[in-house]
Every structure is written in structure tokens, then in C-alpha cells.
Amino acid sequence: MLDYLSLSKHMAIAVTTIVVTANLAACSNSQSKQQSSNKTRVTSSKNKSSHKSSVKQKSNQESDNAANSQTSSKNNVSESASKAESTTKQMDFSQIQQGNYASLLGNWQEVAISGNHHDGTGSRWEESQGTDTLEITKDKLANGSLTLQGNSLNDGTARPVTFTQKDGYLNANLADQSVAVNYAIYFYPKGIAMSGFGDDVPASIDNSKNRIVIWTSNNSYTEVFQSQDN
């Protein structure tokens, strides 16, 4: 009888142990699955975050590239427009007669001079050393103390001028030429040869460039200024 009770007791303990072990195993498997699921969700979340970051970086890079392309395009257009303006710039006779010298703005260099040395040979041309200057602003043309503004030529005394256009060039003469010292200014666009200045005009004068000629009756002194920009 005691052996039977002892055997029953041992069997009950064994069954209990098996049940507990099974429950523990089930719990362990459940926790393992939960942890695996959590890891999967975390990995998926990281992958999504990484993908979003990559997409955002790519979008930012594309935006930067587009902005740089637009800036480069604008610079190219501006540079092309500037070159075109410089290439096609022409003397505007209408503006000049109104005192607007915008079409003459730029660098001018004295390239030839002529004068009467009173040696019996009359006036003769020489290549200039570039000592005199011609300064032009939008509303003023100045050669030393001589200035042209609007319809007035001033060498210390302001005198009215008249404009005449012929043979492709424009000249400004004093309205009253009975003065002690007379002046004239000639505007020659590129492509128009100078006329009335003799046949010995020096080679330094380039008819393919814009030129401004300033003449005074004082020793028939003549200066030729040539545009360095067109």
C-alpha cells in the first residue's frame, strides 16, 4: 500500500514538472516570437527612415542642381547679352543731337593729330603719342577744357552749336563761326571713311572703328580719337 502511494506521489510530481516545463517553453517561444516581431518592426522602421532620408537628400541635391543650372543659365544669358550689346553698339546721331552720349560711352584713345606748323607745308598728319584724352559721360563730352553739352560748346565761353548730318557722319559746328577761335566736332561711325582731311591720313586711323574728330581753327589743330570698344 505504501509503495502504491509513493508511486502515485512520484507520478504526480513528474506530471506537474512536465506541465510546468511545457508552460515555460511556451512562454519562452512566445517571448522569442514577440522579440523577433519587435526586431522586424524596428528594422522595418529604420529601413523606412533610411529610405526617407535618402529620398530627401536626393531631392535636395536635385533642387541644388536645378538652382545651379538656373544661375549658370542666367549668367550665360547675361554674358551673351553684354557681348551682343558691345558688338552691335552704334553711334546714335539722334541722341547725340539731344545731348545724350550713351551710345559713345567707353574707352577712347587719341590715335592721330594734325596741325599747321607754319613752315610752308601746311597742315600735316602725325601719329599721336596718346597724350590728350577724351572723356565721355552720358551727358557730357570733354577734351581738356573744351566741352560739349547738349547744344552748347564751351571753351571757357558757352556757344550754341548746330548739327549737320551728311555722307554717313555727323558734325557739330558753332552757330556763329565769326568768332576768333572756331571749333568743329565730327562723329564718324565705324565703316565710314573720314573725308576732307587730306590724302595722307595715317594708318593708325581705323575706319572699322567709331571715331570722333575735334578740330580748331587755332593752327588748324585736329585730333582723332578712336573707340577701343567697337
Image: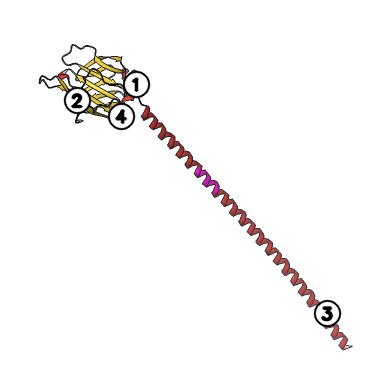
The residue at the point 43 percent across, 36 percent down is 76
The first of marks 4 and 2 along the sequence is 4
The residue at the point 38 percent across, 29 percent down is 85
Q: Nearer the viewer, residue 59 or 178?
A: 178
Is residue 109 shown in magenta?
no
Q: Position of residue 62 (x, y in %)?
A: 53, 45
Give the residue number, with chain letter if any, for mark 1: 92
State the mark number for residue 106: 4
State yes or no: discs 4 and 3 in contact (Cβ < 8 Å).
no
Q: Amino acid at mark 4?
A: Gly
Q: Is residue 127 above or below residue 122?
A: below
Return the residue found at the far left.
119
**Mark 4 and mark 1: Cα distance apart in space:** 14 Å
Left or right: 115 with respect to 37? Answer: left
In the rendered image, which quarter contains the N terminus?
bottom right
Q: Quadrant of residue 182?
A: top left
Looking at the rendered structure, the secondary structure element under dot 1 is: loop
The first of marks 3 and 1 along the sequence is 3
State yes or no: discs 4 and 2 in contact (Cβ < 8 Å).
no
Looking at the rendered structure, the secondary structure element under dot 3 is: helix
In the rendered image, which quarter contains the C terminus?
top left
Give the residue number, with chain letter if any, for mark 3: 12
**Mark 3 and mark 1: Cα distance apart in space:** 120 Å
State the mark number for residue 113: 2
